[in-house]
Amino acid sequence: MARARDLGILFDGASGQWNTITDVPGVEVGYATIVAGDGALQMGAGPVRTGVTAILPRGKASHDPVFAGWFPLNGNGEMTGTAWVDESGFLEGPICLTNTHSVGLVRDAVVGWQARTGTLFQPWSNPVVAETYDGYLNDINGFHVKEAHVRQALDTAASGPLAEGNVGGGTGMVCHDFKGGTGTASRVGRAAGQDFAVGALVQANYGSRADLRIDGVPVGREIGLDRVPAPDWRGEKGAGSIIVVLATDLPLLPLQCRRLAQRAGLGLARVGGVGHNGSGDIFIAFSTGNILPLGGAAVLTGLRMLPNEEIDPLFEAAIEAVEESILNALAMAETMTGMHGRTVHALPYDLLAEAMARYRRRD
Amino acid sequence: MARARDLGILFDGASGQWNTITDVPGVEVGYATIVAGDGALQMGAGPVRTGVTAILPRGKASHDPVFAGWFPLNGNGEMTGTAWVDESGFLEGPICLTNTHSVGLVRDAVVGWQARTGTLFQPWSNPVVAETYDGYLNDINGFHVKEAHVRQALDTAASGPLAEGNVGGGTGMVCHDFKGGTGTASRVGRAAGQDFAVGALVQANYGSRADLRIDGVPVGREIGLDRVPAPDWRGEKGAGSIIVVLATDLPLLPLQCRRLAQRAGLGLARVGGVGHNGSGDIFIAFSTGNILPLGGAAVLTGLRMLPNEEIDPLFEAAIEAVEESILNALAMAETMTGMHGRTVHALPYDLLAEAMARYRRRD
Amino acid sequence: MARARDLGILFDGASGQWNTITDVPGVEVGYATIVAGDGALQMGAGPVRTGVTAILPRGKASHDPVFAGWFPLNGNGEMTGTAWVDESGFLEGPICLTNTHSVGLVRDAVVGWQARTGTLFQPWSNPVVAETYDGYLNDINGFHVKEAHVRQALDTAASGPLAEGNVGGGTGMVCHDFKGGTGTASRVGRAAGQDFAVGALVQANYGSRADLRIDGVPVGREIGLDRVPAPDWRGEKGAGSIIVVLATDLPLLPLQCRRLAQRAGLGLARVGGVGHNGSGDIFIAFSTGNILPLGGAAVLTGLRMLPNEEIDPLFEAAIEAVEESILNALAMAETMTGMHGRTVHALPYDLLAEAMARYRRRD
Amino acid sequence: MARARDLGILFDGASGQWNTITDVPGVEVGYATIVAGDGALQMGAGPVRTGVTAILPRGKASHDPVFAGWFPLNGNGEMTGTAWVDESGFLEGPICLTNTHSVGLVRDAVVGWQARTGTLFQPWSNPVVAETYDGYLNDINGFHVKEAHVRQALDTAASGPLAEGNVGGGTGMVCHDFKGGTGTASRVGRAAGQDFAVGALVQANYGSRADLRIDGVPVGREIGLDRVPAPDWRGEKGAGSIIVVLATDLPLLPLQCRRLAQRAGLGLARVGGVGHNGSGDIFIAFSTGNILPLGGAAVLTGLRMLPNEEIDPLFEAAIEAVEESILNALAMAETMTGMHGRTVHALPYDLLAEAMARYRRRD
């Protein structure tokens, strides 16, 4: 498999070392990928095509909170914990992604993990867990995500290069009627005289074939439905969602994190997202750029803030990182056969190249 | 035990038949109350003082959705499912209340119950589950709420009079440093030439002793901390929250439901609520006044709407119902001893009467 | 005239030096009070009972912005400039209050004043101007507020004691069916080991007689409508609004300013506010506790933040200051006769005292 | 001048009769275009390049309100009247667009017009007026928009084909560093078994040259800055905004109008919008699909609602209409010289064609 830019797709901006969300110093990501069984659905027995993704804003080195903000482009989905993000401006633990019907299990498991590891910020916790729906390939009502999977994702979280495609929470996902899943990318730049990194990680499970555009080229229409069949959505009209997590080391205030999260929708639009009614297009952004010690009673001092007037390079970089993350999810996901023998096809590299060549690319 | 008005407290407005949220036709409420063990905490073994409350907007007779809206006065808490309430204006299943660390279990259990009973509105579900923190009396990190409890609350939901105090999700709660819990009340009236009922159900777990006011009388200060000790919150500073569920049979649009939910805060303020930082004061309101059939593809017709200009009687009635619901939670909750032998005292009727008598009540 | 506490009404908390919003260091307030003509309405000629209030967050000493946030309890009103407050977290100029139909004039006049004084933060400006409706006493469709009045309010803004009642934007207002208008109060306290001041200024024009409560006593019902007639609202059902401006020197982030603004509704509820449909109950709060130089391109450093866990003393103080500000508006407003010879009666001190005496007050 | 599709640009979807917002039955639009003077700025004397656009949701035939909702993609701008749109779900008068510093004048003038014509819905009014900044070409601090211009725009509003480019509020605007202004487009389609029209009108004043994309082609980069100079923004860094008004005859509830408004950002993203910090990207949508008589006291009956599940065709059509409206604004705006002899160049048709030809378009 190859990432999008290795397939010759051109992007704006400079990516970081690994072109992943982990290019933001401190950010760690872990996965639990759960694949088992084949054939017809036996609810509770499988087939299973699902998982968990965990993002630790400061890694395991520090459980100090970060400033954060979230934004729903279309709220047909769940992101728990957002009332407190809205109210406090703080994200006080990891962000986890999973399938729609395992959000609760993952949420309580994060609480348990925090209680055991002594990383509760308050005596209680309302973790941030988001989801997309993998019920086309996965026995979603079989509730196959278990506490051990959550621990696995949290405990294996690491910096460095990341797996993409059919991994973690993205395992069973479908995007623009191709196999979707987990994707990530980053950009580095300068704002207000300071170097910065911004990274995105998406769980991409949205969109129709016809809407897919890559660098302005209507790739979805060019490939069409004849040469690469699309899933049969008759039973699940409108299913689909995308979760975007954005991280940056610039010192943003909570409101600025929300602004950043909102820009994810503009990256999504470039690839062909329209915020369909059935889609839970929910975005969260956090900033590691301030030290926010746990639970002190004195006024916090020494905070920093990117001036709003200097935020445009970050916005542009974030939009680009989201765009590339989605295309990485598409590029890195392999064809998967799951529940009822249903097959979701990967974006075919040859037809992609053919479509791109029909339109002269900038060079 | 006696309800607040049976203790001589005066309220404005006319209550419905049972003075409960179930006075709104169709609304059904069920509880699972989980009490087990005594003495020191053995995490996972207890003591247990917790539960689940389930509110079915149209009862078991109909799983058609209702219009709804929610409002967080202070978001240090969780109410899942709100992204879709915000986006769609619909509440597509029950509302469940439990303790903070069991929200996930309850949420997934509701999904499972919907899947089994064929009452999913979409192929997926993002149920509404809210919480308050009972970790002063309850082994909250022992995760004692199980799927069977959720089914029990849902399956036993009924119209008619309701238990209050130490029941359901309210079992282990503390309010104004007295024993709190579940309370309910209703008002009936007329708006836009139509009879209406509005009902409230609260899970009351907020507030300091000094702030408690009843009919304007500073009862909390009058009783003080010497004669009735308060819990020792040193380990859980600022713990406390209140969830309010409001129901009405007036035909409200979703925006009007949100407006109604927001009024819960004004009822809370009358009793002494200040929206403390540690408090998850989160409110949701729904209207059964429109028939909204599940999943049709044609334009919905025959909808009705209360004119905004006629909404004040409903607002006033809702504020009163919330006020009385909180006082019913206080009045009906019995002294409870839980984890570590901690005791939370009920509001003492004699000292309440004494305090009220010091201030001449309107008559 | 006397302020509320000089009439024997008891309040919690310690007020600042002048018990005004100007107790927050740097805050300056100016008024233009416009009273002319008597008798029947001649639209454009009067009678005129209106004005402008200007609040300068850092006074004339500095036009640097402040962090701010706003909250609408009921949005039947206008507060311009809030889109940018929401987006940026900054308040970049004065806050002005006037009558509903002069908001535009005042808004553009502030722009002109900023352009002339070189205090535009960006090349353009979207000032914050809010309103309540004085059309019961004032020829509101005569548009009697002129640019010179705005300049007067801005240019005369000062620290120190403030006039209250029938002054500035509050000149022609009605509150709980008594004469209302402008009121202010403050509280001082400690949070996170730091002394703080919080001040409120209200333009009080809301509420029905029956709802008025003072220190828990139902003063409105006690006085009733027989001894002190209420305005005849038949032509203007539901007219009424309240604008609250809150200021503090604690270092709040923008989200915390919004949280503070939201608490104004709890103070309002204590006095009997219910957020009626016709009421524009809109609140804004700002913090002078951080130095935010105009327009720099470097990362802002040295910012401070009150920990959320330490914010409760501020919330409680703000609620108290709002409550007292409303009562000061009522206590300090004199009976006024305006358009069509309509008279709105001041809250009568003797009947107030009589009502308070019927209920034993805390002592 | 030619509209975008007459220049050979391809669009998805079917446009209405005139391909304007007035394709939505009842909608009327009027302009006042104010152009005077040349040469250096003499503040108050000109040069003047500005105007007013008025959109009447039901035309002059009916002043009944419509359901509406708004959404700020980036709130560096003003749209007055939104607190009441949010609260009530109603738009109770026209929408007017003008320059940033004339919002107040226009707003009060609309109030006066409503008072004179007896079309106030309540005794007071908080009109919806939005703006973009034309201070590069126009003496914006000269306040050249007068009440007569507002009346002209309102009184000349009509259905049928519309002027575009340098007209109305869009007169002095700049878009992607070409001459911008007013643009409009429409789509017709079917949803929930019903024919519908959706129309957009934009006041386009945002964006950098490099970001402009047309049908996926990076036209801005292809044309570059050498052959067609861009304005010199040194004094007004980040200036720019876009207001979008969306209208449909589908019966949307207020929440659905807000959802529709939010989709404007996705159309904007397709053309290259990034929601820059300096940009006031504010959108409003209304639905004429329900009859909402003014001020009745009885429950409204017979309302209709498009099911959320059927809303995707509308979303897609709206995104397309916004995209085409922006390109119409660019295509129809002529090169303009204004204040200080500054010239803003129109998008050159030849270079546009050359750029499009370098990229093979779908056919």
Image (cartoon, coloured by chain):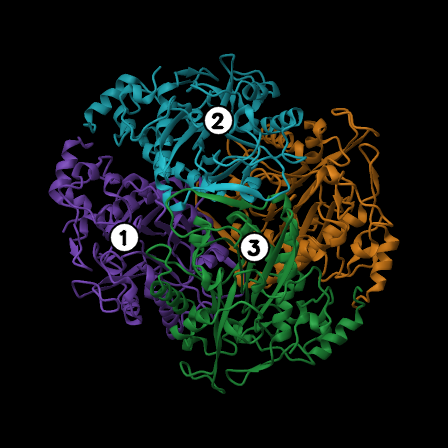
Chain colours: A cyan, B orange, C green, D purple
Can you identify the residue that label 1 sits on?
A: D235
> Label 3 is placed on what type of residue?
Asp
Q: Three-letter amino acid code at disc 2?
A: Val
Left or right: A219, with D263 as reference point: left
Q: Residue A227 versus residue D145: which sits nearer the camera?
A: D145
Q: Position of residue B123 (x, y in %)?
A: 51, 30
Density class for disc 2 (Cα within 10 Å; few <14, some 14-19, many ≥20) is many
The answer to whether marks 1 and 2 sit on the same chain is no
SS for callout 1: helix
The answer to which quarter of the image holds residue A164 is top left
Residues packed near mark 3 inside 10 Å, few (<14), some (14 to 19) or many (20 plus):
many
Tell which subunit mark 2 falls on: A
Q: Which residue is mark 3?
A: C249
Q: For this rendering, which residue is in front, C145 or D248?
A: C145
Q: Is residue A97 positioned above or below C265 on the image?
A: above
What residue does disc 2 label? A27
For label 3, the SS is: loop
